[in-house]
Image: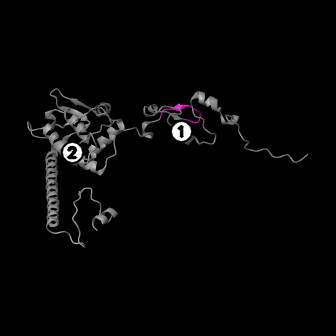
């Protein structure tokens, strides 16, 4: 008889088969709903580990007290310090921080002098030149209508707190597009988003109708940027008038050159080695370097 081969220390395993010394089988582990830890895992690692989302416990249970699995398969609650609960805070750029600091310095208009719809009209004239996404004015107008005149006065702040679902329904956009729009307005310094610790928007008013506590959209930039919006709209209007005047001058110059060419052609024919003036449309004329342009200038 030949030499007997030594047994393989690590024989191949069939699907679903585990040695008895490693504890429960896969079927028993799935039925109990608890994770199976290997025999080589240190107790310290098993006590500090927690399951992935959807395997052994829902995510909501982790943030409500959660579960921490031990090596024996039992469970024990762990403290909230081991996991960072959501706080509702958003990432702020330097531009957002500067806009928020400027809004914090706004003390409000004098009593009886607040004009929220005048602020809205100035923003409407300047909105095409601020580089904002579509439906920006529609959202701002909707938010302004949710405030009261005394919210813009001293001792108060123009804040409104519509829900994200209501905002998406009004604008006809998806929640993701609504978030993009809100962030663009925040970065442009048109509104300031005041976040609560939980990330929810809410507010309370007193018996006199004044805001006691509110988290949501702060519209105070419309008030202290009112003069800036008027100036921006005036500069844009002046630029349009200047461009209109330049177009008129160019039209008159082309017309005069064409009439001059027609007069010269009527007085004397063009010499053989000369160039004839041919009228052409300025917006559709080819470039000089192109083949069509070289044919025109021959």
Q: List the residue tagged with mark 1.
A: 47
Q: Quadrant of the N terminus?
A: top right
What number of labels is visible?
2
Which residue shows up at 46% across the image and 31% down it? 61
From the viewer's perspective, is 113 left or right of 44? left
Q: Which mark is residue 115?
A: none
On the image, the x and y values in percent for residue 74 come to: 56, 31
The magenta-colored residue range is 70-77
Q: Residue at x 28, y 32 (%)?
A: 170
Q: Is residue 280 left or right of residue 19?
A: left
Q: Residue furthest top?
A: 207
Find the residue positioned furthest to the right.
1
Marks 2 and 1, the one that precedes in the sequence: 1
Q: Is residue 43 left or right of residue 60?
A: right
Q: Quadrant of residue 256?
A: bottom left
Query: Regarding mark 1 in the picture, which secondary structure is present there?
Result: helix
Q: Pointer 2: what residue?
A: 127
Q: Is residue 154 visible?
A: no
SS at mark 2? helix
Residue 76 at x, y percent in the picture: 51, 32
Residue 156 in magenta stretch = no
Q: Locate the C terminus and report the quarter of the image it occupies.
A: bottom left
Magenta: main secondary structure? loop
Q: Nearer the viewer, residue 280 or 231?
A: 280
Q: Is 71 included in the stretch rendered in magenta?
A: yes
> Picture coordinates of residue 127 (x, y %)?
21, 45
Q: Nearer the viewer, mark 2 or mark 1?
A: 2
Front residue of 49 and 105: 105
Q: Residue 190: image x %, image y %?
A: 23, 44
Name the quadrant containing residue 132.
top left
- Position of 71 with respect to 124 (left or right) is right
The residue most toward the left is 112
């Amino acid at each position: 008889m030949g030499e007997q081969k030594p047994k393989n220390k690590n024989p191949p395993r069939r699907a679903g088969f585990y040695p008895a010394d490693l504890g429960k089988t896969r079927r028993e582990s799935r039925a109990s709903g608890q994770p199976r830890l290997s025999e080589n895992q240190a107790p310290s690692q098993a006590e500090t580990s927690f399951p992935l989302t959807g395997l052994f416990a829902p995510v909501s249970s982790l943030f409500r007290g959660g579960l921490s699995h031990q090596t024996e398969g039992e469970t024990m609650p762990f403290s909230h310090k081991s996991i960072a609960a959501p706080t509702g805070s958003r990432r702020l750029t330097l531009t957002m921080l500067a806009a928020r600091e400027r809004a914090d310095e706004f003390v409000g208009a004098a009593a009886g002098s607040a004009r929220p719809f005048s602020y809205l009209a100035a923003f409407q004239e300047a909105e095409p030149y601020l580089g904002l996404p579509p439906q920006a004015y529609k959202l701002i107008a909707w938010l302004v209508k949710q405030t009261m005149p005394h919210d813009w006065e001293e001792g108060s702040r123009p804040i409104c707190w519509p829900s994200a679902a209501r905002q998406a329904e009004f604008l006809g956009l998806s929640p993701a597009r609504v978030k993009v729009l809100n962030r663009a307005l925040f970065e442009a310094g048109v509104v300031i988003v005041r976040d609560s610790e939980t990330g929810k928007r809410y507010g309370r008013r007193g018996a006199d109708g004044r805001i006691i506590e509110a988290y949501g959209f702060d519209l105070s930039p419309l008030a202290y940027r009112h003069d800036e919006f008027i100036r921006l709209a005036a500069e844009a209007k002046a630029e349009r008038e200047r461009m209109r005047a330049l177009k008129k001058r160019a039209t008159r110059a082309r017309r005069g050159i064409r009439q001059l060419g027609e007069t010269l052609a009527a007085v004397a024919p063009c010499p053989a080695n000369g160039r004839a003036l041919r009228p052409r449309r300025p917006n559709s004329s080819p470039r000089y370097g192109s083949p069509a342009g070289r044919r025109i200038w021959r």
